[in-house]
Image (tube, rainbow, N blue to C red):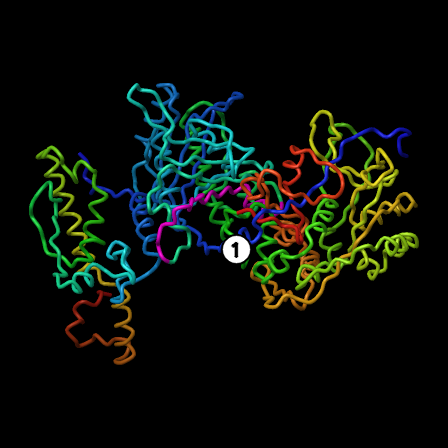
Amino acid sequence: MPPSKPTSLIVAVRVYPEPKNVDLSFDKPRRKWSLPDAALVFDTETSIDQRQYLKFGSYRFVVDGRCLKEGLFYADQLTATERQVLERYVDAQSAEVVGEGLSELLLLPRSGFVKELYRDAYKARCLLVGFNLPFDLSRVACDFTKAEGRFAGGFSFGLWSYIDKQGNERRHPYRPRIGIKHIDSKRALKGFTGRKIADDSDLIPEGSITGKPEEDYIFRGHFLDLRTLAFALTDRGYTLEGACEDFGVENGKQPASQHGIVTEDYIRYNRDDVQATSELAIKLLEEYSQHPIELQATKAYSPASIGKAYLRAMGIDPILERQPRFPKRYLGYAQSAFYGGRTSAHIRKVAVPVVYTDFRSMYPTVNSLMNLWSFVTASEINVVPDCRAEVEAFLGQLEPDSLFDPAVWRQLTAFVQIVPNGDILPARGRYSVQTNDWQVGLNHLYAAHDNSNRALWFSLPDVVASVILTGEVPKILNAFRIEAHGRIAGLKPTKLRGMIEVDPAQQDFFRVVVEERQRLATRTRAWVPTLHHSYRYSDREVRDPKEAGWGAEPKLWSGSFKMIWNEFLYLLQVTHFNDAQVFVD
Amino acid sequence: MRRKRPQRDPSAVYVRDAIAARRICGRQCVCGEGRPWALVPEKDPIICYECLNRENGRATVEDHHVAAAANNTTTIPVPGNDHRADLNAAQYDWPKKTLENPDGSPLLARAGCIRGYIDTNDYLIRKFVRVDPEVYECLDAFLTEKFGPQWWVNTGLEKFAPKR
């Protein structure tokens, strides 16, 4: 039952911003990457107050899965008593390394450890491994600022400093900083920033075949956050303990008797954590290597990243690469009609009646029913404009039962511009005063004024849902359909996780993954579900329009209503899976 | 007193090798030399020090300062590529002060001599003594095929057979 008087709410939509130099961003060569054989694995322990200051930590230098060096490090402000505990500990213990490793268990101040980190992770380009890496990196930093450019909206951490002639600690001007920008609780963009003066060897790009330095090259690092990789592989948020269990790590996480106070037991606990992290890295990378894709493990931010890499592996490039003249206006309309699904509980710790509804594999099932694979593999997608009468007629005779006919679903590849008048449609707004967060809700939606300036674009399936729920066909101003034509030349078969062959020219990929999931009873280490969700959205994020080469005021194709710049920045976080991908790096 | 031989810092070795390898990008000299430290990365096509010296009419053998020049003037002649890829590279692991001995400390000079002796000994062992076990295994398979499973019986090698 709709309220008698609608509540006023600003709604926001996604947009498609047209980059200034489309061709340049697409023409960047994709460099080959090979997984480094060495890794610096570390973990920190902190005070247990709100500030969570670094107390100490430990690290391992691992080559080909074999630990060659192990050490502890401590915070500069550690008390003398606490430091003595560490000193006594390293005197009594030796490093847990293989035969040719350094048998001495090292003890370094924070500055000594970050020197090793610089040498290993930046100069030698090893993997830098941790579980929830952004937290640990922030603990070993000596300063931070707001990040700019690539990591705008995040933090820029300085790990390296020097002592000037007056005895003051200053930022090291010739070391890179580390930029971190969180996407959500499981994912963060991480990378080294540029240096004032880089050595020639640091300017040799990854995968270079000439070994020649390139002046504008910036090595971003190989930051491997195992929390992110585990999520990308399974679509599940893990703790270190849970990940170790699920991925069969022999020496998993051990419990700590007490946190925040430096004791022998606590040091042992920290060393065990690093060992568990190190072993988990091997397991996760083994699992990741089963996927025949070229995506760097360090850039697998989500299941969607892996899904997109599979598309590349099958010879499917983003639509704008193969059809650069696709009309951007329609990309804008389609983009503004996109509402990514997510569920969240707004009522917590209160018993309320619920209806348990389980849609297994809903996204790929809908994709398959709508025959969207033909669009993904099309050599060309055509827009059929001005379909208002056709869509009105379709909606006018629509009955819920007609949706049990698969042929009807194939007619849903259209977008509709309507002036909402109590229709039940998705809208993105700040529904909660407490969180002030943009959320998508499905509500009765009214335009403030009945004119075309208040019209919004929706995908036809959303409008179909509204018609079924309300029994009313909305007021339609405009509509267009899209049609897939032809098939990309050079489609290549692939094997899902190296096991299940898929021929993109012959099979509907979405259908294959739905069927595979159905076939697999277990959800443990569920790599098929991973791919299920790979097509619901892309996680490629547009972080700064200027950095993306769009200039200060990019041309927006978002329909006919105004956007606020701040919202624009916010809303550009996610792009649709299909043809609206924006490549910025 | 420390009785163990000095240990190399494995991550320092790795870092140096990784940087050298990056400059080489998997390329090799026409002679087959592929060790990054033995190659001249600036040359295109890439070439090793020995071939470069040969091309320029210079000797392919170089004099190696066993204890580092700052500590002792003793040199030994070694192939140029080994000089750079093995013996010089090993000296990068020495403490900088021992390697450079800026003040001419007699103790550091002595330390340099000991380290140099160990490095050179390691090099010679690798070069002359530590033959690949695969060579023996391959030869044993060949002889077994040719003369049967106990091919060494009634030969001069019988005395080396394990006692059962």
Question: Residue sitting at 72 percent across and 40 percent down?
Answer: A13
Placement of A55 over or under B84, stated as above or below:
above
Placement of A451 over or under A528, stated as above or below:
above
The total of numbered circles placed on residues is 1
**Residue B21 located left or right of residue A577:** left
Mark 1 nearby-residue class (10 Å; few <14, some 14–19, many ≥20):
few
Residue named by callout 1: A27
Amino acid at the residue labelled 1 = Asp
Question: Residue sitting at 28 percent across and 79 percent down?
Answer: B148
Q: Quadrant of residue A371?
A: bottom right
**Residue B28 located left or right of residue B52:** right
Q: Quadrant of residue A198?
A: top left
Viewport quadrant of the N terminus of chain A? top right
Closer to the camera in the image, A246 or A498: A498
Closer to the camera in the image, A40 or A506: A506
Q: In the image, residue A390 lies at what x, y percent?
A: 87, 56
Chain ID of residue with mark 1: A
Q: In the image, residue B50 lies at what x, y percent?
A: 19, 61
> Which residue in the rendered view is the most extreme toward the left?
B73
Q: In the image, residue A111 lies at what x, y percent?
A: 35, 29
* Magenta stretch: includes residue A233: yes
Closer to the camera in the image, A246 or A69: A69
Which stretch is magenta? A210-235
Q: In the image, residue A147 lies at what x, y percent?
A: 51, 32
